[in-house]
């Protein structure tokens, strides 16, 4: 599902430090 793919991408971005938690949540809510 697209949601799962997005979650994996956001998760990896968080692990790599590319997004803050707040930014990731904002992106997830807007998706």
Image (cartoon, rainbow, N blue to C red):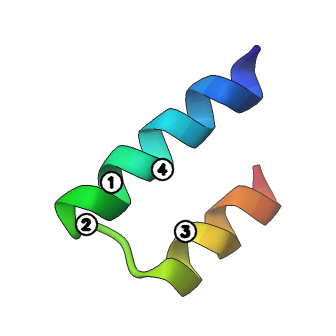
Circles 3 and 4, Cβ within 8 Å, touching? The answer is yes
Image x and y of residue 25, in percent = 66, 72
Per the rendering, the mark at residue 13 is 1
SS label for mark 2: loop
Residue 31 numbered tag: none
Disc 3 is placed on an element classified as helix
> What residue did someone put label 2 on?
18
Q: Measure the alpha-carbon separation of dots 1 and 2.
A: 5 Å
Residue drawn at x 40%, y 81% is 20
Left or right relative to 3: residue 10:
left
For mark 4, does the 10 Å Cα neighbourhood hold few (<14), some (14 to 19), or many (20 or more) residues?
many
Q: Label 3, on which residue?
A: 24
Dividing the picture into quadrants, the one containing residue 3 is top right
Q: CA distance from mark 3 to mark 4?
A: 6 Å
User: Residue at the top extreme?
Assistant: 1
Whether tag 1 and tag 4 are in contact, CB under 8 A, the answer is: yes
Numbered disc 1: secondary structure: helix
């Amino acid at each position: 599902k697209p949601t799962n793919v997005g979650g994996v991408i956001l998760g990896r971005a968080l692990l790599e430090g590319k997004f803050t938690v707040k930014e990731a949540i904002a992106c997830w809510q807007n998706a």
